[in-house]
Amino acid sequence: MNRERGELRTVLGSMMVITALAFTMVAALITPFLPSASAANHDINASYSAGFVPSDITVAVGDTVTWHNLDSSLTHTITSDNGSWTELTLPGGGTVSRVFNVVGDYSYHCRPHPSMVGVVRVLNVIPEFPSLALVAAGIIAIFAGLVAVRRRSGT
């Protein structure tokens, strides 16, 4: 009876190790492809006197950038330097937003006021908590399984 229990513990421990290894490998492999935990909004002020502030901003894939026109009587544009997006019109005192879903540097300018320039740098940010927590849980399960197997084998 004790021998059967010992064998069962060895089998269960081995299964736990294999399952945990598979779980950890899958979590580690999919982590780079998961979107950010939550998309953020970033604000840029636009005015003829100061230009775009900040003029250089870094965001994560999926984040939204909102431009705020501080000039109540002037219309500005958010015009891509390379034509990668349709020109956005920023009415006096208004706002306009754009979601950035592709990694890259996006230079832009205000067509009526060419001295107003800026760049949005989009990075692929790996989510930190959910995926890394899964990997950590998998590693703990692997060690628990190894301990169970080791106790059974007496080594």
Image (cartoon, helix red, strand yellow):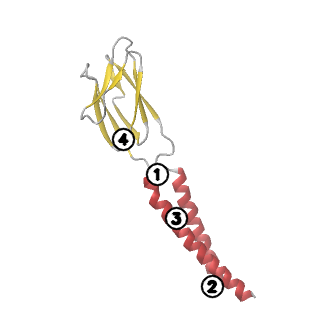
Tell me what residue is drawn at x 59 percent, y 77 percent. Answer: 14
Please tell me whether residue 128 is drawn above or below residue 113 in the rendered image: below
The residue most toward the top is 73
Tell me what residue is drawn at x 63 percent, y 80 percent. Answer: 11
- In terms of depth relative to the viewer, which is nearer, 8 or 49? 8
Q: Residues within 10 Å of mark 4 (few under 14, many from 20)?
A: many
Q: CA distance from mark 1 to mark 4?
A: 16 Å
**Which residue is under mark 3?**
24
**Which residue is under mark 1?**
34
Do callouts 2 and 1 mark residues in contact (Cβ within 8 Å)?
A: no
- In terms of depth relative to the viewer, which is nearer, 150 or 95? 95
Which label's residue is closer to the chain start, 3 or 1? 3
Please tell me whether residue 22 is drawn above or below residue 96 in the rendered image: below
User: Which quarter shows the C terminus?
Assistant: bottom right
Foreground label between 3 and 2: 3
Do callouts 4 and 2 mark residues in contact (Cβ within 8 Å)?
A: no
Q: CA distance from mark 3 to mark 2?
A: 25 Å
Q: CA distance from mark 3 to mark 1?
A: 15 Å
**Which residue is under mark 4?**
122
Residue 153: numbered disc: 2
